[in-house]
Image (spheres, rainbow, N blue to C red):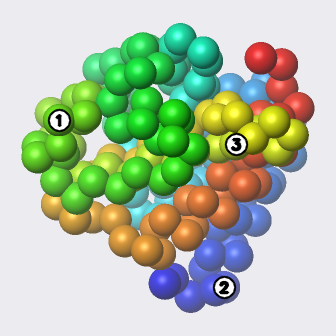
């Protein structure tokens, strides 16, 4: 686990990003960058989950993924959204659900953001790494707590 102080600082950055001015996509870009910095992650994406499609809202990293939109039934993101549970894969080359976003990705963690009222998956936090087995319990805890912070913002948003 990261020190509580570091986690608390990261979550405060997420709260500030969400409280700032601007459209939801601007806020989510700030959130993606805050999480990327806090975790030392290569790439962080925030996706909107619709009934039929998952679409990229914002990202922090070098470039956008090769699939900014895809069917809600596909990939690790689709499973995290459907199951409403965090999905961690230490070696994406061995997981048939993996939908390639970057050729260099070796491991991935996807955390659902649940609607505070309905419990439905409204968004996803997707973090990708070029290292095998890059994500552990401390990453899961941090990202799940960030998802809880984000939940209020997406629960208030239409759709």
Instruction: Please tell me how crowded label 1 is: few (under 14), some (14-19), or many (20+) other residues with Cα within 10 Å.
Output: few
Of labels 1 and 2, earlier in sequence is 2
The x and y percentages for residue 159 are 77, 17
Q: Which residue is tagged 3?
A: 114
Secondary structure of the residue carrying numbered label 3: strand
Image coords of residue 127 (percent x, y): 41, 48
Of 95 and 7, nearer the camera is: 95
Residue 42 x/y as whole percent: 34, 51
Measure the C-alpha gap from mark 3 to mark 1: 25 Å
Q: Nearer the viewer, residue 118 or 53?
A: 118
Residue that numbered label 1 is attached to: 96
* Residue at 51 percent of width and 83 percent of height: 2
Q: CA distance from mark 1 to mark 2?
A: 38 Å
Question: Would residue 111 be found to the left or right of residue 147 on screen?
Answer: left
| Res 126 quadrant in image | top left
The kind of secondary structure element at disc 1 is loop
């Amino acid at each position: 686990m990261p020190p509580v102080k570091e986690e608390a600082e990261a979550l405060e950055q997420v709260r500030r990003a969400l409280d700032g001015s601007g459209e939801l996509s601007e806020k989510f870009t700030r959130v993606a960058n805050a999480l990327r910095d806090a975790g030392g992650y290569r790439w962080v994406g925030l996706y909107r989950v619709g009934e039929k499609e998952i679409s990229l809202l914002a990202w922090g990293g070098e470039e956008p993924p090769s699939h900014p939109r895809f069917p809600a039934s596909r990939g690790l993101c689709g499973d995290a959204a459907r199951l409403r549970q965090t999905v961690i894969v230490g070696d994406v080359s061995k997981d048939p659900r993996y939908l390639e976003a970057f050729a260099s990705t070796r491991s991935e963690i996807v955390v659902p953001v649940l609607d505070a009222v309905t419990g439905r998956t409204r968004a996803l936090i997707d973090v990708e790494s070029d290292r095998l087995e890059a994500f552990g319990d401390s990453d899961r805890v941090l990202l799940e707590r960030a998802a809880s912070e984000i939940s209020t913002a997406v629960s208030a948003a239409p759709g």
